[in-house]
Image (tube, helix red, strand yellow):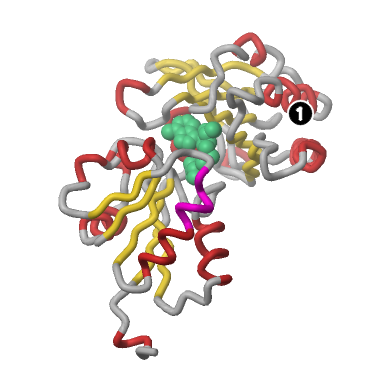
Amino acid sequence: MPSQSEKKGKLYIVGIGPGSVEQLTVHARDVILNADYVLGNDTYLDQIEELLTTQNIYRSSMGKEVDRAKEAVKLAENNVAVMVSGGDANVYGMAGIVIEVAESNNLDVEIEVVPGVTAMLASASVLGAPVVVDAATISLSDLLTPWEVIEKRLSAAADAGFIISLYNPKSRQRTSNFERAIEIIRKFREDSVPVGLVKNALRGDEQEYIVTTLGEVLEYNDWVDMRTAIVICNSDSRIWNSPNGDKIITPRGYHRKYEY
Ligand code: SAH
């Protein structure tokens, strides 16, 4: 067995941010450009297409995450292998499964996780300042998490006043989860609290957003899809009818101490 220093492989798990290539960190960009292999699903590889020139590419479809992770771990033994993941790799991303597979295969090369801008923060940036205070992300996908657990977390987060960022609101198979989640949150929050819906955040011309309230958000139920992130605010938050369209502000509390 060669010692660690003689091995030339390395495994990177890279968050490529929410959309356009400009949203990648400089480090993520460098890592991708210098890879021997880049692995990912079609959506993510298309997102960084302009950076894929000389690297070998391993494409696999959504739902094939485990196979892709195994392939990355195998390639990393002797190559610089880069697994790309949308947004941040730790937020419902590929960091988990790739590191689990590396652990079970006793992969003996360095692993580096490169962070990226996650959907909660990309959508928050579109909406203004809706987060700023304590926040919880909750995925509504019940493929790997039982729905009862998701319901419990929704109730707890809503009860505790967290700003709630919903991921995976819908898929082709799961069209009612978003509606069910809103009904749960409404048990704990006033209908007047602001809600922001952002589709394709920071993906150039594809980006769209809606500012509404908890009481009215289900009027946009049909508009919400798997490319949408939702920010449910709390009773401190307010809608600002700004000259550039409606935005959301969640005051952190400066107004209680300062004048401005
Ligand atoms: N790792 C990713 C999240 C993967 S889960 C991240 O950190 O962002 C996939 C869900 O993320 C989608 O269903 C959607 O709710 C959200 N999402 C990802 N990118 C988005 C974007 N650019 N705009 C809006 N929502 C996005």
Of the residues shown, which amino acid type is indicated by label 1?
Answer: Ile
Could you tell me residue 9's position as x and y percent?
32, 73
Could you tell me residue 156's position as x and y percent?
80, 42
Q: Which residue is mark 1?
A: 185
Verify whether residue 62 appears in magenta: no
Q: Is residue 237 left or right of residue 61?
A: right
Q: Is residue 241 left or right of residue 41?
A: right
Query: Residue 129: in sight, yes or no?
Result: no
Query: Residue 121: in sight, yes or no?
Result: yes
Q: What is the span of residues highlighted in magenta in the rendered image?
A: 64-69
Q: Residue at x 68, y 44 (%)?
A: 144
For label 1, the SS is helix
Q: Is residue 134 above or below residue 130?
A: below
Q: Main secondary structure of the magenta part?
A: helix
User: Looking at this view, is 230 or 86 the one in front?
Assistant: 86
Hey, which quadrant is residue 187 in on the image? top right
Hey, which quadrant is residue 4 in on the image? bottom left
Could you tell me residue 178's position as x and y percent?
67, 24
Q: Is residue 24 above or below residue 82?
A: above
Outermost residue, top direction?
219
User: Looking at this view, is 18 or 256 the one in front?
Assistant: 18
